[in-house]
Amino acid sequence: MPAKTGKPPVISRQVLADHVYQEVLVALMDGRLEAGRGISIDGLARDLDVSPTPVREALARLEATGMVRRVALKGYRVAPLFSSEDLAELMDARLVIEPVNALRACERRTPELNQALEQSITDLKNAPRGASFAEFRDYWEADERFHQLIAENAGNQFILSAFNSLGGQIQRFRFFSGLGVTDAECAIEEHAAILQAFAAGNPALAQEAMVAHLTGVKKRALLDVVEHA
Amino acid sequence: MPAKTGKPPVISRQVLADHVYQEVLVALMDGRLEAGRGISIDGLARDLDVSPTPVREALARLEATGMVRRVALKGYRVAPLFSSEDLAELMDARLVIEPVNALRACERRTPELNQALEQSITDLKNAPRGASFAEFRDYWEADERFHQLIAENAGNQFILSAFNSLGGQIQRFRFFSGLGVTDAECAIEEHAAILQAFAAGNPALAQEAMVAHLTGVKKRALLDVVEHA
DNA sequence: TGATCCTCTTTCCTATAGGATTCACCGATA
DNA sequence: TATCGGTGAATCCTATAGGAAAGAGGATCA
């Protein structure tokens, strides 16, 4: 079918639902889909030039992330934006899970993990800090990778799934949309402090550093909100 | 239109996908769907006498619970059964989340919550302890409700969603399938201890009691496995 | 003028059909 | 006898079509 352009059908066999999933995710984070707005299955299918069936499947998966909400027989809606209280709750939740992750990942540390963490910090330093999602994406991705790496190496699949269920990084970005990066220097320093604890092989210190980091993120974020209010 | 039967169109407008979801869930817990077995979308649709579309949507939602796994272009499979290591990991994960839930829920306790918790313990006592899922269901439901109530009243939507993402109770049941209830007396006592801490208004004690409960569950469960091996 | 009813559009939900791929089975050949 | 290629069925994935309900808007009547 794609012989039209002459290009080989490299990824011709890709699940459309996955494509739709990614597309909607980017649209959500880009702000093209405003909070609270209804999502028409048929309309979305027309826009993306696919049939409603893969759209339906993609939205069903997206619902588990909390980005969209579904009401039976009424359709899907974009989840409302974060309030300050929501953000505080999210950081509290991360404070429950992530310090333990840091502790355990440090206990199980490997040279490969340390190197990957260091790489993510380097990427964080070099990433641009734009206000739009396109510019912000690299920064966000490096930040997310740092925490994800620790969660993945904590050696507990269930805590990992709980961590992922927070959708923390994604939701957090939606909150900051339009605010840009204001605490890059602090965040880089705190990440580095955690990495140092890993390098020193001090799990308790790693745990403390993670607590300090998340507490700092929470405090600075709420401060930003006040300033912009 | 529904004047044919004279009955009001009570639930005539029900989403088939929800029905399929429930049906598959029960089949999974009943053991009719063995672990590791492939799930044919078309076949399941034939069995339930619906079209593949709602089956597809139900499975997409079910995947988020961890009960089934999906491989692109390959289909869905029933998730493998729990091993002892998996169970230990799950209990460790619950030990991270639930004691905090107990602490915070106790801080925010209300007479209604205390009453609901007491009711769940009463139900736990009166529930039959069969080996089959049908007989076991009431016991499991009361146990699950106790923990769910605490999680819901901890005042943090994200920790709640993380707790739910564990799918802990469901997965746990699948592990115990065929073993029946062996620690009912201990579990009831420990639930009661937690409730006492709530009634006394002692959050720290509630947290401790939850740690003791989960540690006990973990220990007894692993012991059961050894005995039956 | 205000309320009620009707109609039309939009949208959700499900069923059916067909293209594409993978896997198993089976026969032929070195 | 072991390996290779072909055939068929089963399955996944997507598109199209159609029934049913909810909401918006306007027309009619008291």
Image: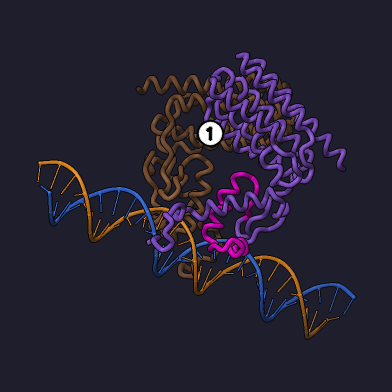
Chain colours: A brown, B purple, C orange, D blue
Position of residue D8 relative to residue A157, above or below, is: below
Position of residue B228 relative to residue A58, above or below, is: above
Choose between B205 and B84: the one closer to the eye. B205
Choose between B12 and D4: the one closer to the eye. B12
Residue B3 drawn at (x, y percent)? 39, 61
Residue at horizontal 42%, vertical 55%?
B9
**Which segment did they paint magenta?**
B42-71
Residue found at the far front of this picture: B6
Query: Quick check: can you spot residue A114?
Result: no
Position of residue B42 relative to residue A89, above or below, is: below
Q: Amino acid at mark 1?
A: Gly
Choose between B158 and A126: the one closer to the eye. B158
In the rendered image, residue B111 lying in the magenta stretch gets the answer no
Of all chains, the one bearing label 1 is A
Residue at horizontal 71%, vertical 39%?
B172
Determine which quarter of the picture holds residue B42: bottom right
Residue at horizontal 58%, vertical 29%?
B149
